[in-house]
Image (tube, helix red, strand yellow):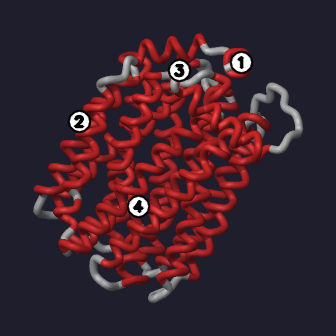
Amino acid sequence: MKPDKKIFGWVMYDFANSSFTTIIVTVIYSVYFKQVVVNSGELGTALWGRAVSISMLLVALSAPVFGAIADHSRAKKKFLFYNTYLAIIFTALLYYVRAGDIFQGMLFFIIANFGYNSANVFYNSLLPDIVSRQHLGKVSGWGWGVGYIGGLLSLILILPLVKNNLTRWAFPAVAAFFWLFSLFTFILLKEVRRGSKRTNYLKTAFQRISLTFRNLRQFNQLVKFYISYLIYNDGIVIVISFAAIYGATRFGMSGQELVIYFMIAQVTSIVGSFVFGYLVDRIGAKKSISITLLIWIVVVLAAFFCINTRQFYLVGLLAGIAIGSSQSSSRTMLALLTPADKMAEFFGFYSFTGKMAAIIGPLVYGEISRISGSQRWAILSVLLFFLTGLFTLQSVNETAGQKRAEEWSKPNIMNS
């Protein structure tokens, strides 16, 4: 299979939006919020955890509705556009957040993160429109790999700003990066339209959500995967949200050091995404995810026991491999277990489960840090999510689930 302009347009969105999660969520704004905006020890960690959790709650509540509307109206690309620009606008507005602007800093981030995560519902659901089922793992891996290249480039571009104490300018710079490269997606990617009619989309959304819950009972393996993902994704969200805060707090790493640290980690993320993209197609998504979760367990234990910055750098290299591969493999497994004509709806539910779980993890991590006064003990909570998620995943019969998804047809849905 050779990449065409549809695939190129699709993967370029990963390239564009990775600047947001890399700079805003993980590396720069998270630390800026804790150390500059709040500047009150581990209270900043707790408030950051609450901001992440609130944004995830909003996504969790809206994602099934958005997914059902998009599926019915065949307007996935339109909703991708709206949510993308919501994220871009409020990312740029973070420039106006200064020391002491706690409410404003939380509000702007919550809205931006809501837009970013909501857009991903529609972006993920467009994957089966551009590639056949047998190549889903490969193309999903390309997306994550190219996304980490975008994250690496955004880190390189904002490094001079951080070095010269112009951190606030990094936020509109990220917005500009996100906007510029998302244009490739909106210009090149054409949504497959199978016919639709004007209707009351909100009413239809709730009807289809109700139908989704009934239909899910007929996809036992998909339900099991949802439960597993709900658990282990919480651990991934904690790592993404608090990794830079952990390095800055425990090892006193500066903004410049953190940027360089995550530039190095991005390289292994790129390798992990591409390698596991091919591995999924060879050994299956379940085995691939299991391998990544074992890597995550090692990462958490290593982060707990490491005692200096040099050791923490080695942890980052390993975490880079785990994060790209686990997210890519998870997206592929969902697509394999989902009927072709329920993609937006079930991807919306996938986002719902992931974000519902992600409400808990950041809160737990933040509050343990605040109460204990140390993030070193809080990081052990992440271990529980990965272990439990790995154990639950083993109950999924990937072959049976994929067969069920392929047999499912539109008349079955309409008559269920």
Q: Read off the residue under disc 4.
A: 26
- Residue 117 or residue 5, whichever sits in front: 117
Which circle, 2 or 1, is nearer the viewer?
A: 1
What's the amino acid at mark 4?
Thr
Q: Read off the residue under disc 1.
A: 415
Residue drawn at x 28%, y 37% is 293
Question: Label 1 neighbourhood size at 10 Å, few (<14), some (14-19), many (20+)?
Answer: few
Say whether disc 4 or disc 2 marks the residue closer to the N-terminus.
4
Residue drawn at x 67%, y 16% is 412
Does 114 appear above or below 321?
below
What's the amino acid at mark 1?
Asn
Q: CA distance from mark 4 to mark 2?
A: 22 Å
Question: Does the CB distance between marks 3 and 2 fall below 8 Å?
Answer: no
Q: Secondary structure at mark 1?
A: helix
- Residue 106 or residue 219, whichever sits in front: 219
**Can you tell which mark lies on residue 218?**
3
Q: Read off the residue under disc 2.
A: 294
Q: Position of residue 372 (x, y in %)?
A: 18, 72
Res. 8 in view = no
Q: CA distance from mark 4 to mark 1?
A: 46 Å
Q: Position of residue 137 (x, y in %)?
A: 48, 25
Question: Label 3 neighbourhood size at 10 Å, few (<14), some (14-19), many (20+)?
Answer: few
Q: Secondary structure at mark 4?
A: helix
